[in-house]
Each structure stands twice: as structure tokens, then as C-alpha cells.
Amino acid sequence: MTGTLVLAGTPIGDIADAPPRLAEELAGADVVAAEDTRRLRRLTQGLGVTPKGRIVSYFEGNEAARTPELVEELLGGARVLLVTDAGMPSVSDPGYRLVAAAVEKDVRVTAVPGPSAVLTALALSGLPVDRFCFEGFLPRKGGERLSRLREVAEERRTLVYFEAPHRLDDTLAAMAEVFGAERRAAVCRELTKTYEEVKRGELGALAEWAADGVRGEITVVVEGAPEKGAGEIDDEELVRRVRVREEAGERRKEAIAAVAVEAGVPKRAVFDAVVAAKNAAGRPPA
């Protein structure tokens, strides 16, 4: 008989949110694999639990090497409990590699459902929750971040991101540039903790707010792109409207912003259409 791999959700803030089964699994597992053994110690102390099994570390730096060891434990009949620092394993945390390896060996995998920053932020955001997609952390480099955002610029589902506090202002500014400064969003900070805060507003305003610095664990929820109607304005019409405004004396930047508001599209979409038209006009005939 093979063992069982148990993925256990841990509190994202308030330890009182821990599900009762978490304490039972911590007490009874043969092996507890933890992202941070020091945090595990604080968790078990807070729950009044003493694990009977062996405790090992399992984090990004050693998961490739430790996964085969844990699979051997599972094949030998052990009950292995996997916990991360907060929330569910595998969701932007270690776990996927071990789950995939266990499944490949026909080992039973189950879970202790627990708190989730993704779902908590989504529920509190005030944005549509019927359809959403989780995008995890964006790239740290500015160019790569913009490229990733452009990939989902037309995504109609609500978007959920994790972000580090020291990068939040740059990320919100990039979102405002790509999605449009008027796109609604919510910045959820320190969820379930003493200083929990949910800041709702348009991306442009949120980027200005974050420029002063924001602390804590951050989850960002962004409204999906507006649905395209049958009479949607095409790029040619966007360029024509910008040209009309420029000929009337407006600067290009203001003309693009005004047309974006009129058409209900991101400023970036109007800008790209104008640039594409300029490039096309400058190319020699084929």
C-alpha cells in the first residue's frame, strides 16, 4: 500500500482561520514538509500541536532534490503533509513538482482546504467574481512586465495578481499604461491581519496612491477588459479621430487620451493604432 500526500492550507494572517483538520494532520503525519520550518514551529505552537512525524524543509531552493525523497516515503506507505508559509501549496508556492511526481506514481493526493489570498481578495474587491484568472507574480523587469500585461490586455475575466510591496507602484503604473488608467482595480493588503486594507479605485489613481509606499502582503485584483460590441470602433477610426483633434489644435497626447475615453478603450490601444498608422504611411509601397 502506498501512502498519501496531503496538501494543507495554512492561515494567510489570522491563525484562528486554520481549519480544525490542519491540527489533526500536523499531529498525525509521518512526515511534515514545510516551506519554512521556523514558521511551522510558530504555527504548531499557536495551534497547540506537537507533530509526531519527521519535519523536513521543502522550498524553492531544494524542492528538485527533495521531491524524490518524499516520493520514496510515499511509496513506502507514509502520510506526507505539505504546508507552505501561507495559503495553499502549489499556488505560487512549492508543491506542484511533488504533486506531479506523486500522481505519476499513482500515489493518492488529497487536501485540507484552507485560507486563500486569491479568493479572499477576489471576494472583497467588489469586482465581478463569476469568471477570473490568477496570474501570480509579474516579472520584475519593466519590459518583461509590460509584455506579460499586454498578453492579457483583452482578457475579459477578472485578473488576480500577487505583488511585492516595493514593486507595487511600478506594477500599478504599468497596468494603467497597458489596461488604461480608468480600468477599475482593488489593492488588498494584509488580508485577515490587524491592519487589513482594501483600496479600490481606478488604476491611475491607485498608482498615484502607491507611489508614497505601501507595506505588507499584497494581492491586486483588476477588472477584465470591457466586452467588445458589434459596433466597436476599429483602429482606422481611432486614428481618424486623433487626427481630427490634432488638426483642431490639440496635442497628440491629449488627443489620444480624449479619444480613448470617447471610445471606451485603453489609451495604449489608441496610441498603438496611431503608431501603426504612422509606420504604415512611412513604408514604401509593396
Image (tube, helix red, strand yellow):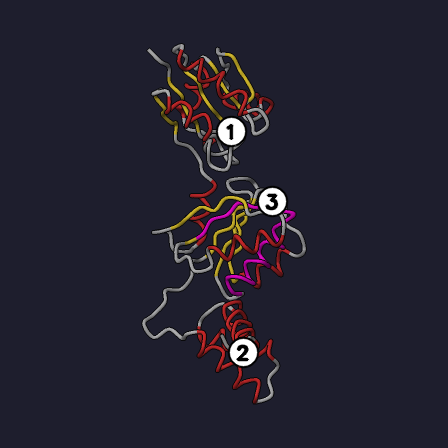
Residue 178 counted in the magenta span: yes
Q: Is residue 44 left or right of residue 127?
A: right
Q: Could you classify mark 1 by the number of other residues whose Cα lies within 10 Å: few (under 14), some (14-19), or many (20 or more)?
A: many
**Crowd class of label 3 (few under 14; some 14 to 19; many from 20; radius 10 Å):** some
Q: Earlier in the sequence, mark 2 or mark 1?
A: 1
Quadrant (top left/top right/bottom left/bottom right) for the N terminus: top left
- Secondary structure mostly seen in the magenta stretch: helix
209 and 250: which is toward the camera: 250
Instruction: From the top left corner, tell me how far across and down residue 282 is, in percent.
Output: 57, 77
Q: Amino acid at mark 1?
A: Thr
What is the CA distance from the residue labelled 3 to the residue labelled 1? 18 Å
Residue ID at (55%, 62%): 176
**Circle 2 is placed at which residue position?**
281
Q: Earlier in the sequence, mark 3 or mark 2?
A: 3
Instruction: Give the residues in magenta.
Output: 159-180
| Dot 2: element | helix
User: Mark 3 or mark 2, which is nearer to you?
Assistant: 2
Structural distance between the alpha carbons of marks 3 and 2: 43 Å
Say which residue label 3 marks: 164
Q: Does the CB distance between marks 2 and 1 fall below 8 Å?
A: no
Q: Residue furthest front?
A: 286
Residue 30, compared with residue 265, is above or below; it is: above
Tell me the SS state at disc 3. loop
Label of residue 84 in the image: 1
Q: Amino acid at mark 3?
A: Ala
- CA distance for labels 2 and 1: 55 Å
The three-letter code of the residue at mark 2 reads Ala
Q: Residue furthest bottom?
A: 248
Q: Position of residue 210 (x, y in %)?
A: 62, 55
Q: Secondary structure at mark 1?
A: loop
Name the residue rendered at 45%, 15% in the picture.
27
